[in-house]
Amino acid sequence: MSLYEQDFYQWIEEQAALLKAGALSQLDVENLIEEVESMGKSQKKELYSRLIILISHLLKWDYQPDQRPKSWKSTILTQRKELKLLLMDNPSLRRLIPEAVNQIFEDSVDFAVDETGLPESAFPETCPYSIENIMGE
C-alpha cells in the first residue's frame, strides 16, 4: 500500500518537500495529477453550489414578496460575498458563470418550490437574472 493510500497528509507533505527540493523525478506524478484535477473540480463545484443557493433565494425573494424574512436577504448577501471571494481567488471561474447558471437554474427552481410551496409553474423556465443581477453588481 502506498503512502498516498496510507496517510494522505504525510503524502502531501512529502510531495511538497520534493517539489521544493526540485526532486521532480521522485514525485508521485500520477496521484499528483489526480489531486490537482480534483482541486479544480472542487472550485467549480463550489461555484455551482453557491449559485444554486443564491439564485433560489433571489427567486424566493422575487416570487414570494409577502414573505421576506431577514434570513433570505442575509443568505443573498452572504452568497454574493462568498462568490466574490471565490472569484478573487479563482478569476478564471468567472467565464463559467453563464454556463453554470443555465445548468443549475432548474435546481434553483426546485429549491425555491420546496421552500415556498409555490408550484413550479410560478417560476420562469429560464433564469430571469443577468450575471450582474446575480452578483449584485
Image (cartoon, rainbow, N blue to C red):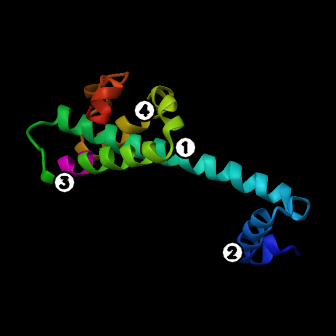
Which residue: 28% across, 33% down?
119
Q: Residue 2's image quarter? A: bottom right
The residue carrying pointer 2 sits among few (fewer than 14), some (14 to 19) or many (20 or more) residues within 10 Å by Cα, namely few
Above or below: residue 94 compared with residue 9: above
Q: Residue furthest front?
A: 21
Residue linked to disc 4? 106
Going from N to C along the chain, the mark reached first, 3 or 1, is 1
User: Number of callouts in the render?
Assistant: 4
Foreground pick, 14 / 48 = 14
Q: Is residue 43 left or right of residue 104?
A: right
Q: Which residues are magenta?
A: 71-76
Residue linked to disc 3? 71
The residue carrying pointer 3 sits among few (fewer than 14), some (14 to 19) or many (20 or more) residues within 10 Å by Cα, namely few
Q: Quadrant of the C terminus?
A: top left
Foreground pick, 14 / 34 = 14
Label 1, label 4: how many angstroms apart (C-alpha)? 18 Å
Give the amino acid type for the residue marked by disc 4 in the picture: Glu
Residue linked to disc 1? 44
Query: At which x and y percent is residue 136?
Result: 26, 35
Would residue 72 be visible to someone looking at this image? yes
Which residue: 28% across, 51% down?
78
Q: Is residue 30 left or right of residue 46?
A: right
Residues at discs 1 and 4 in contact (Cβ within 8 Å): no
Label 2, label 1: how many angstroms apart (C-alpha)? 23 Å
The residue mark sitting in front, 1 or 4, is: 1
Kind of element beneath mark 2: helix
Going from N to C along the chain, the mark reached first, 3 or 2, is 2
Give the amino acid type for the residue marked by disc 1 in the picture: Lys
Label 3, label 2: how many angstroms apart (C-alpha)? 38 Å
Residues at discs 2 and 1 in contact (Cβ within 8 Å): no
